[in-house]
Image (cartoon, rainbow, N blue to C red):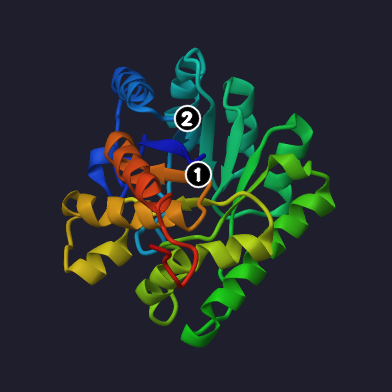
Amino acid sequence: MVKFVGVINLSPESFYSGSVCMDLECALRRAEEMVRQGADMIDIGGMSTAPYKRTWISEEAELRRVIPVIKELSKLDIPISIDTTRTRVAEMAIEAGASVINAVKPNDEIVEVAKEFGVPIIVVANEIDWNESTVIETTIRAMRNEVERCLRIGVEKSKIIVDPAIGFWRKAKWFVRDCMVIANLDKIKAEVGFPILVGISRKSFIGKILNLEDPEDRLIGSVVAEAIASVKGADYIRTHNVLETRWAVEMAKAIAEFMIKSDRVKV
């Protein structure tokens, strides 16, 4: 069954302003709404990691943004993940009540934190050299690299989730790459052998294809792509729009149950 990960950004520099909360009250209200809408997890980020934007802030600033919110949201009956590139932020977030690490740029140190605390880790595949003819092959290899890193360091198999990095690989025709990954997610999952999380919501490949510069306008493109990803085997969908995504996924799954698996139909 697909699980839904609701996104709350505490970073005004985030690419989609509709996901941003700038105070504790807003974040709590948004989280409670997402829970009502069917979220299975809330993902908290304090610094945008969009690869095409200048979004760097200091580690201390990131901590000031995320720690108070995580402490409050951890009182809710739902797992909280910390979306970060920094080891210390991950560690302090877990101590504050987060129960999952979303390692956007995984390295040995941040994986060590997951092992030390015994929490699940989402590892986003680091970009390696690729072209249009090697998209699937290189995506699988990059995802396996992160799985191998986790296993080498000692993370339990059951606590590893892999993200194919939709929107993060920016070489060549990146928007083609993102579409190809979603279209072939079933093949990728079969080869990688671990649960897959996809972050599709309102991303730039949707804007490129539909000629929609403003992320605010990308809702329909998002839920269509998310529905396809769910049919193709995504285990988790990270989204800004929990309710609309859940509806689209449930509809796609209901229809997919009636797909004819044979080339011949008996009447």
Name the outermost residue toward the front: 267
Q: Residue furthest top?
A: 75
Q: Compare marks 2 and 1 and give the one earlier in the sequence.
A: 2
168 displayed left or right of 244: right
Query: As displayed, is residue 163 above or below residue 135?
Result: above
Whether residue 90 sits left or right of residue 43 in the image: it is right
Q: Amino acid at mark 2?
A: Asp
User: Badge 2: how crowded within 10 Å, few (<14), some, or many (20+)?
Assistant: some
Return the residue at label 1: 236
Q: How many marks?
A: 2
Residue at image mark 2: 40
Q: Who's the residue at 50% across and 60% down the image?
A: 165
Given residues 173 and 266, the one toward you in this image is 266
Residue 55 visible in the current orientation: no
Evaluate if marks 2 and 1 touch, with contact meaning CB atoms under 8 Å apart: yes
Q: Which residue type carries mark 1? A: Tyr
Who's the residue at 79% across and 41% down the image? Answer: 156
Residue sitting at 41 percent across and 30 percent down?
39
Residue at (50%, 41%) from the top-left corner?
83
Compute the Cα span from label 2 to label 1.
Answer: 9 Å
Q: Is 102 above or below relative to 181? A: above
